């Protein structure tokens, strides 16, 4: 019985034909059987390989293309060139925020991947699911373009602001996407394609509890500073009154010396986004330093140093006020 299969011969891809007599004429054509004889055969060479005969093409086989094999003029089989299996190498590194409880008026979440991802697929592969396992439809704002960092590894997804801001049509008709006292999960599908088209190594999710609304301006004057001793390399530690946006913390906080120059060192965000630390490259000088806070710094509900995201128009205290960065002086001793 004659059989055909994909194989390798002397290191090259080939079509292997078994069960044919030595010297038989093996021809491979494209397209499939109904048109055999209307197109010239593929260019290539026929190589005996033990009891089998191999057809090695001059040019590579094409993925997804059907090839018809004939022996001495009779069709003996068809093969479709399979596409190579895509390896699952990319994985979800983190889902943010990292806080276990978020406000009901949560504004954004994020997903960080280990490699660049394909653009335009978030709407189909990132979901919010309630505590009963049902998808929360209409919770996430469809984004065009999507909110990626420069490496296309960190995706930011927004909850629909029209459902969060009181007085807007979306809020009046549908209410908040989240419910206080309940939980929900952010789910990332395993078949979310990376930039190469491969799926994720595994899907991922993170569970959150939903607390009360947060409608206060971020107030650096209320932060707790643990000042390091002079002539040490101990870190400056800053404690917040609520979780803050981790991505914004990385670029909205800096430490300056008495001359206003940035102090060399490295900083990091503490557990659940409730703190920040800064370790200098050199030892602290016994002099007045300052923590400088960009007014764009936000909490999880989008409230910043400069404004309340969903402000009460009757409260003058909530009026936005643009101004310079806020400074918190401290002096290592």
Image: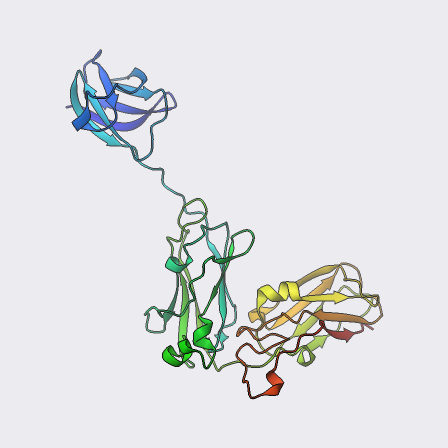
Between 23 and 252, which is closer to the camera in this rendering? 252
Q: Can residue 256 be seen in this view?
A: yes
Residue 145 or residue 55, whichever sits in front: 145
Residue closer to the observer: 182 or 247: 247
Quadrant in the picture for residue 38? top left
Furthest residue toward top: 23
Asked whether, in this view, residue 98 is left or right of residue 21, the answer is right
Q: Position of residue 240 (x, y in %)?
A: 63, 76
Looking at the rendered structure, the number of numbered marks drawn on it comes to: 0
Looking at the image, which is closer to me, 112 or 124?
124
**Residue 311 pos. (x, y %):** 54, 81
Is residue 176 in sight in this rendering?
no
* Image quadrant occupied by the N terminus: top left
Is residue 84 depicted above or below 97 in this figure? Answer: above
Where is residue 31 drawn, in percent x and y?
A: 24, 28
Q: Is residue 226 above or below residue 15?
A: below
Q: Which residue is drawn at 21% across and 14% down?
A: 25
- Colour scheme: rainbow
Please tell me in which quadrant of the rendered image residue 127 appears: bottom left
Image height check: is 158 above or below 167? above
- Name above or below for residue 299 compared with residue 53: below
Q: In which quarter of the image is residue 141?
A: bottom left
- Residue 296 place in picture, x, y as percent: 63, 70
Left or right of 301, for residue 321: right
Who's the residue at 49% across and 77% down the image? 103
The C terminus appears in which quarter of the rendering? bottom right
Residue in the image at 55% along x and 56% along y: 149
Tell me if 288 is positioned left or right of 234 in this view: right
């Amino acid at each position: 019985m004659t059989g055909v299969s994909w194989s390798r011969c002397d290191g090259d891809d080939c079509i292997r034909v078994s069960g044919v007599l030595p010297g038989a004429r093996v021809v491979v054509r494209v397209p499939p059987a109904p048109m055999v004889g209307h197109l010239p055969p593929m260019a290539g060479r026929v190589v005996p390989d033990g009891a089998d005969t191999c057809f090695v093409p001059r040019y590579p086989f094409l993925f997804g293309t059907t090839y018809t094999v004939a022996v001495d003029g009779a069709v003996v089989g068809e093969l479709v060139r399979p596409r190579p299996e895509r390896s699952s190498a990319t994985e979800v590194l983190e889902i943010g925020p990292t806080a276990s409880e978020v406000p009901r008026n949560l504004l954004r979440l994020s997903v960080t991947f280990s490699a660049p991802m394909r653009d335009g697929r978030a709407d189909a592969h990132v979901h919010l699911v309630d505590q009963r396992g049902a998808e929360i439809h209409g919770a996430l704002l469809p984004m065009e373009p999507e909110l990626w960092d420069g490496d296309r590894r960190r995706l930011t997804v927004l909850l629909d602001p029209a459902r969060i801001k009181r007085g807007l049509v979306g809020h009046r008709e549908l209410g908040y996407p989240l419910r206080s006292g309940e939980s929900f999960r952010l789910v990332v599908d395993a078949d979310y394609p990376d930039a190469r088209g491969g799926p994720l190594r595994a899907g991922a999710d993170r569970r959150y509890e939903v607390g009360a609304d947060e409608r206060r301006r971020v107030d650096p004057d209320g932060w707790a500073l643990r000042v390091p001793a002079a002539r040490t390399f101990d870190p400056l530690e800053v404690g917040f009154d609520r979780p803050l946006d981790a991505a914004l913390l990385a670029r909205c906080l800096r430490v300056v010396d008495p001359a206003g120059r940035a102090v060399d060192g490295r900083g990091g965000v503490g557990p659940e986004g409730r703190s920040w630390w800064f370790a200098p490259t050199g030892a602290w000088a016994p002099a007045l330093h300052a923590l400088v806070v960009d007014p764009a710094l936000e909490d999880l509900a989008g409230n910043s140093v400069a404004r309340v995201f969903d402000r009460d128009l009757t409260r003058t205290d909530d009026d936005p006020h643009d101004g310079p960065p806020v400074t918190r002086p401290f002096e290592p001793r």
